[in-house]
Amino acid sequence: MFDFRIDADDKPTMYRDLASALQGLVAGEPDAIANMANASALIYETLPDVNWVGFYRNVGGELVLGPFQGRPACIRMTFDQGVCGAAAKTQQVQRVEDVNAFPGHIACDSASASEIVVPLVRDGEVLGVLDIDSPKKARFTQEDEAGVVRLAEIMLSAM
Ligand code: SME
């Protein structure tokens, strides 16, 4: 059993603790699916005000649903579809304050109001994306972005 207690008051400390918990969780395990599954559970359990946390993997140039926590989600997206597609295509973090104002956003859960998607890029190649959704508008700040980018870096070493 893993019982991580992460209850820091400020975001940088919370993300630092979350990153070290994630590092411990994936250490020594080479299976990418297992690591993505545990990562999505840990992040979903730790971050307040999120309703979906998960991965899409680049399978033959298409984003295919991977391990996640939350409601059942859309299974496949091209690099031209959704916020995830934009992150994969541009290889840039997409931090969207209001998903309804993002052209082409794919609503898997109508409760989602904002999201952050971090591309997982190794040697110039997109392996997938880490997608986190919130029912609150503008849930993700610059501090969240820095924290989630760090989590994505850890995942890159675990897949
Ligand atoms: N938000 C995504 C679709 C996937 S779900 O939110 C899980 C998008 O538009 O990329």
Image (tube, rainbow, N blue to C red):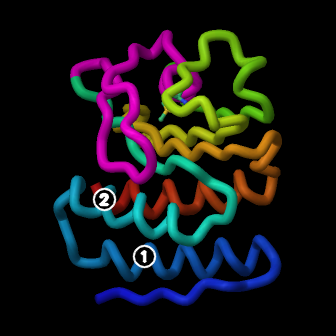
Specify the amino acid type for callout 1.
Gln
Q: Which residue is mark 1?
A: 23
Give the mark nearer the N terminus: 1 vs 2: 1
Q: Quadrant of residue 155?
A: bottom left
Instruction: Identify the element where label 1 is drawn.
Output: helix
What's the residue at 30%, 42% (across, down)?
Answer: 66
Quadrant location of the C terminus? bottom left
Mark 1 closeness class: few <14, some 14–19, many ≥20 residues within 10 Å: some
Determine if residue 93 is in view. no
Q: Position of residue 77 (x, y in %)?
A: 39, 18
Instruction: Indicate the position of residue 1 as horizontal and vertical percent values.
Output: 29, 89
Name the residue tied to disc 2. Answer: 37
Give how far apart the Cα atoms at labels 1 and 2 are.
14 Å
| Image quadrant where residue 73 sits | top left
Q: Position of residue 78 (x, y in %)?
A: 39, 14
Helix, strand or loop at disc 2? Answer: helix
Is 132 displayed left or right of 68 in the figure?
Answer: right
Q: Give me the residue at 37% from left, 38% from top.
A: 72
Q: Amino acid at mark 2?
A: Ala
